[in-house]
């Protein structure tokens, strides 16, 4: 099917960026009433139930060819859901939601790096190298000198590292997914979330004990996290890629950190450091430079 970028494509892209951008604010609010591992477990479990119901009702086949790779599929699912959700939930106990959102902007840069390292067909260009330089310099500024100091007085440094570990997980998942044989995207989402749930629930039980009782307010936050940024966003992403193409989809990388900063300052009244503005600018510049050729193609296609 030929990709066509329409007004609806831009609307869906904006909605997706908005949903993902609010995720960090909702996590921040939910953490007031639940522990981080059980927050991740609830979020994944709710989304897993929804996606499995939709996938099973469609009677779609998971693997579209005779080739199957269950170990890579399950590992990809853990790195796409359980591992980063735990890292973000734990890390956001000690950092602002704006920090978490900005750190996610580096995922695209890591994917470029990992693709070059693990796929011989991937070529690295001058723009890619220059973009990575800007982006990773921004990440260093975002982490701050506290990360490199041996001090146990605050866990903020560990929270920052946890958020960056989440970006590593997302990028790793993207590389693993690329290695998979042809697979149904809805089935992929369902199995990924199920794999994540099977990993995070025992982990939460082992580390934090049995599931805690939560207030009605916290339950609402958990439902929002499971329904929108986890389940609904998955289907929006599939629709955008199928109709407008994967290059167009990458534009969400520029939206998410901006929305997260907006909600962090306006609704949560969180402090925002100058260093975070500099880091955000460098990471976004790095993204733009590294994806220059793709963006040019997108502009050319959209102008036809």
Image: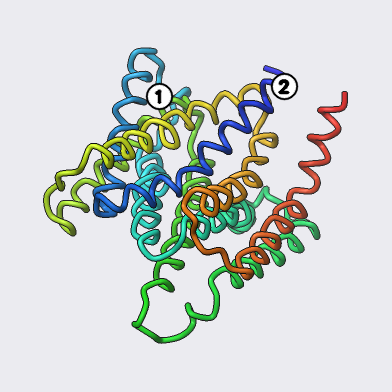
**Rendered view: 267 above or below 136:** above
Q: Quadrant of residue 152?
A: bottom left
Horizontal side of residue 113 vs 235, given as left or right = right
64 and 138: which is toward the camera: 138
Q: Quadrant of residue 141?
A: bottom right
Q: Residue furthest bottom?
A: 150
**Rendered view: 248 above or below 131:** above
Q: Residue at x 53, y 71 (%)?
A: 143
Q: Residue at x 33, y 17 (%)?
A: 56
**What residue did someone put label 2 on?**
7
Which is nearer the N-term, disc 2 or disc 1?
Answer: 2
- Residue 157 in the image: state x and y as whole percent: 43, 73
Quadrant for the N terminus, please. top right
250 and 35: which is toward the camera: 35
Count the labels in the image.
Answer: 2
Horizontal side of residue 93 vs 204, given as left or right = right
- Residue 268 in the image: state x and y as whole percent: 46, 52
- Residue 122 in the image: state x and y as whole percent: 68, 50
What is the spatial separation of the Cα atoms under label 2 and label 1, in whole angstroms?
Answer: 32 Å
101 and 271: which is toward the camera: 271
270 and 283: which is toward the camera: 270
Within 10 Å of disc 2 (Cα), the crowding (few <14, some 14-19, many 20+) is few
Within 10 Å of disc 1 (Cα), the crowding (few <14, some 14-19, many 20+) is some
- Of labels 2 and 1, the one closer to you: 2
On residue 62, the disc is 1
Q: Quadrant of residue 220?
A: top left
**Rendered view: 44 above or below 27:** above
Quadrant for the C terminus, please. top right
- Residue 230 in the image: state x and y as whole percent: 41, 36
Q: Residue at x 62, y 58 (%)?
A: 113
């Amino acid at each position: 099917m030929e990709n066509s970028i329409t007004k609806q494509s831009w609307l869906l892209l904006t909605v997706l960026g908005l949903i993902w951008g609010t995720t960090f604010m909702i996590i921040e609010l939910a953490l007031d009433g639940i522990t981080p591992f059980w927050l991740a477990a609830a979020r994944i479990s709710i989304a897993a139930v929804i996606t499995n119901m939709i996938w099973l009702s469609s009677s779609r086949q998971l693997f579209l060819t005779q080739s199957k790779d269950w170990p890579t599929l399950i590992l990809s699912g853990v790195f796409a859901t359980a591992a980063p959700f735990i890292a973000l939930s734990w890390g956001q106990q000690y950092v602002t939601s704006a920090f978490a959102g900005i750190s996610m902007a580096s995922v695209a840069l890591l994917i470029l790096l990992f693709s070059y390292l693990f796929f011989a067909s991937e070529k690295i260009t001058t723009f890619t190298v220059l973009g990575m330089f800007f982006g990773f310099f921004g990440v260093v500024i975002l982490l701050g000198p506290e990360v490199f100091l041996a001090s146990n007085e605050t866990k903020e440094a560990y929270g920052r590292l946890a958020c960056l570990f989440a970006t590593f997980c997302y990028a790793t998942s993207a590389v693993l997914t690329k290695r998979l044989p042809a697979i149904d995207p809805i089935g992929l989402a369902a199995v990924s979330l199920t794999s994540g749930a099977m990993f995070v629930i025992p982990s939460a039980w082992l580390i934090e004990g049995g599931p805690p009782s939560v207030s009605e307010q916290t339950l609402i936050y958990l439902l929002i996290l499971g329904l929108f940024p986890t389940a609904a966003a998955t289907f929006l992403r599939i629709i955008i890629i199928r109709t407008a193409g994967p290059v167009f989809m990458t534009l969400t990388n520029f939206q998410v950190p901006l929305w997260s900063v907006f909600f962090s300052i306006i609704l949560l009244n969180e402090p925002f450091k100058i260093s975070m503005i500099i880091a955000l600018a460098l990471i976004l510049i790095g993204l733009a430079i590294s994806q220059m050729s793709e963006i040019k193609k997108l502009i050319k296609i959209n102008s036809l």
